[in-house]
Amino acid sequence: MQLFKSMQLIIKIAILLLFKGVYQVKGNDCSGIISDNSFDPSQIICALAYNLISDITQIDHNLNFPSSDCQNIKTIVPSNTYYGTGGDNCDYTKPIIFNYNSSPYYAQRVFLYPINWVFQSTISNCPTLNSSLSVNDLAPRFNTSSLSLYFSNITLCDYFKTNFIFPNLNQMVTKISFSPGLYVKYIEKLYILIFKCPLGCSSCDDNLINCHSCADGYYLSNNSCLKCDINCQTCINSSTFCQSCPASKYLYTNNSCIPCQNTGVFISGANCLDCDQNCFTCVNSPTFCLSCPAGTYLYRNNSCQSCQNIGVFISGANCLDCDQSCLTCNGSLPTNCLTCPSGKYLYKNNSCIPCQNTGVFISGTNCLDCDQSCFTCNGSLPTNCLTCPNGKYLHDDNSCKICKINDGFTIEGIYCKACFKGCKTCFGISKNQCSDCYDSYSLFKLQCDQQYFVYNSSFGDSSMQSINQSIGQTSQIAYASINNIQLSN
């Protein structure tokens, strides 16, 4: 009976070693397990494979155990090269982490092929194991493993689990987490197979043939993913019909990807849009112009206009507002006016004023200075005065001069008027308003008359008549005498 049990143990070990002979791999050679399962090697990535690891340094450096307690190598079956990686104090309830990047391939599903070991005193105490698998930190999938082999002489419970699957993944793999279970102490074999979609597919069917969707840089055509043009990040229907663009390029209105540095376009998020036709260049919106086409100029609201309206002027590439006092101008200052609005007139310093001040007068659209002798005027000559400054008075020729009140003139309001003839001073311009007379004139009854007229007026009418009669008679006698002389000769 004892011999039978010994033979049974030898057979079990032989069978186990036979299996081990098939899978004696280190590193990333999964050819044996792929062949045994009749998988298509072209559809599979061997992400991890280790078996019969006798040195922890032989394990893929991307495989991270929960703690240093799990990084021991032990011969599980005495007198045989039957190694397990782990430790009696290893807590495999915490996951083993495998960091792996499957780019550029998307994984349709991930397979895990482990062999686990636990130590128990009797076969009746070999428990069922609950293991979990997670990919890319997605919610884990759980599997239950029952006892496969029991080695009674060393109270060894052997668990062998195949096709531990994380299905319908359709992602690039970056991280795989495997928790063997509560009772596991050592792991002898561990394979991770990634079943990949065809290159360019981001999801595919279970047969790994027909694409359902495509990765960036590919587009779907007849269940296949074809490569986009190099200028597209993503495309649809054809290689040049871009949906998104690579860095430093932007999606234009014709679904091409361009740098968006030409005139007439601007960047809006990931897109390159046309500026409004009135803009030469623009930013942020089609109508927010930065520069303008020939013949138009940039206005303060970032629009482009011809700058021919009233109230604006051209300054380089810009159209600027005139000062509000100007109708048209050639600069922004109040003294840059060319024409003026209604009610104002262009002054000599090119400002627009009401022209209601003293010393100025309106001439058409201009406001001109009076002659400096005038206070107000209606022309620029000294004889265009309307009123005079203090101390001067308006003469008959509309000039402003000092009024010579002691030399034949008198002041009447703002005017300087000439006294009546012969008056040197007067208090009015009438004949009988004289106060003093010039030489050869005599003042009589407030009048200035020449002196013989004054003499004449001192005789009465009868005296003058008598004198006239005397003069007349003398004249007749003289006349007769002359005639007689002539006759006698």
Image (cartoon, helix red, strand yellow):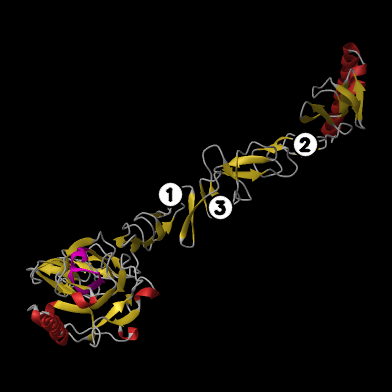
Please tell me the numbered disc located at residue 309. Answer: 1
In the picture, measured across the screen, residue 439 lies left or right of residue 92, that is right
Residue 281 is left or right of residue 114, and the answer is right
On residue 389, the disc is 2
Bounds of the magenta span? 110-129
| CA distance separating discs 3 and 1 | 15 Å
**N-terminal of the two: label 2 or label 3?**
3
The label nearer to you, 1 versus 2, is 1
Q: Is residue 270 left or right of residue 36?
A: right
Q: Which quarter of the picture shows residue 182?
A: bottom left
Q: Give the farthest residue toward the front.
A: 1
Task: Tell whether label 3 touches label 2 (CB within 8 Å).
Answer: no
Residue 489, position in %: x, y?
A: 84, 36
Percent coordinates x, y for residue 34 in the rendering: 12, 80
Q: Is residue 360 shown left or right of residue 289?
A: right
Q: Amino acid at mark 1?
A: Asn
Dot 1 lies on which element? loop
Circle nearer the N terminus (3, 1) = 1
Instruction: Tell which tag, 2 or 3, sits nearer the viewer.
Output: 3
Query: Which quadrant of the figure has residue 407?
Result: top right
Q: Position of residue 325 (x, y in %)?
A: 56, 43
Of residue 442 and residue 88, the one placed in the foreground of this image is: 88
Of the numbered discs 1 and 2, the one sitting upstream in the chain is 1
Q: Residue at x 30, y 60 (%)?
A: 273
Q: Residues within 10 Å of mark 1 (few under 14, many from 20)?
A: few
Residue flagged by tag 3: what amino acid is it?
Answer: Ser
Q: Residue at x 76, y 30 (%)?
A: 415
Q: Is residue 120 magenta?
A: yes
Q: Is residue 123 magenta?
A: yes
User: Which residue type does callout 2 highlight?
Assistant: Pro
Q: Which residue is mark 3?
A: 332
